[in-house]
Image (cartoon, helix red, strand yellow):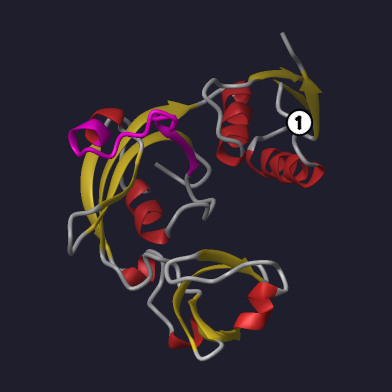
Amino acid sequence: MKEGDFILLDFVGKIKETGEIFDLTVEQVAKENGIHNPDFVYKPIPVIVGSHMIIKGVEDELMKMSVNEKKKIIVKPEDGFGNRSEKLIKLIPVSEFRKQEMEPYPGMPITMNGLNGRVLAVSGGRVKVDFNHILAGKELEYDLEIKKLIETKAEKVQAIFNIFVKTKQDVKAKIENDIAEIYDNHSLPKEVKKDIADAIKKWVEGIKKIRFIEEFE
């Protein structure tokens, strides 16, 4: 693969130390490991190689792979979700939570100032919050398989839409000269549409304008 290639990728991601699966796309593996979620859509994910939308350790290996190739890799923390940093563990007054009508408890997920974290402890009127990624500092193990190379402009537009919006079925996309039309029944926020449009113009050659057309049956 090379930078700019669009692919469909199947993967199983595990914490190397424990063998715990933290993410995957393969339904049969989920069933075999007792973690199947009937509400989750199990299917290969679209990836733009070289776009830095996935972790570096996986992206670097994809550059060395071919369609239909399977590979098991180990990803070091610095090429995954980063090393743990004590600077990202903060003490926050309980009052800050109560202003938002929240009662903090250990394990509680929170978002604050654009950072995702989880509560480690509540004591003495203060809340200890860890803003490190939950997989920070972990060596990871991935089983990768490139299922398909996406080649047409319409499929690439569909792929980018699916990177930003998780859907059970692919949206319809139509290319007319330098215009891409996306037919969908999701009422997307304006900022999400802008992110999708910017990505299409960047990664799909010759597309200068994107139209979002809401279509309901």
Left or right of residue 154: residue 43: left
Is 34 in the magenta?
Answer: yes
Residue hosting label 1: 187
Whether 110 is drawn above or below 13: the answer is below
Location of residue 126 in the rendering, given as x and y in whole percent from the top left corner: 55, 87
Q: Which residue occupies 27% across, 35% down?
A: 30
Check the picture and name the quadrant holding the C terminus: top right
Most common secondary structure along the magenta stretch: loop
Label 1: few (<14), some (14–19) or many (≥20) C-alpha neighbours in 10 Å: few
Location of residue 205 in the rendering, given as x and y in whole percent from the top left corner: 67, 35
Whether 62 is drawn above or below 206: the answer is below
Question: Which residue type does callout 1 highlight?
Answer: Ser
Name the one closer to the observer, 4 or 174. 174
- Give the residues in magenta: 30-48
Instruction: Identify the image quadrant of residue 71.
Output: top left
Name the one closer to the observer, 201 or 132. 132
Name the one closer to the observer, 33 or 210. 33
Q: Which residue occupies 38% across, 76% down?
A: 83
> Among all residues in the image, which is located at the extreme bottom?
124
Q: Which residue occupies 57% across, 33% down?
A: 162
Location of residue 213 in the rendering, given as x and y in whole percent from the top left corner: 80, 22
Check the picture and name the quadrant holding the N terminus: top left
Q: Is residue 157 visible?
A: yes
Find numbered disc 1 in the image and state the secondary structure of the residue it sits on.
loop
Location of residue 35 in the rendering, given as x and y in whole percent from the top left corner: 28, 39
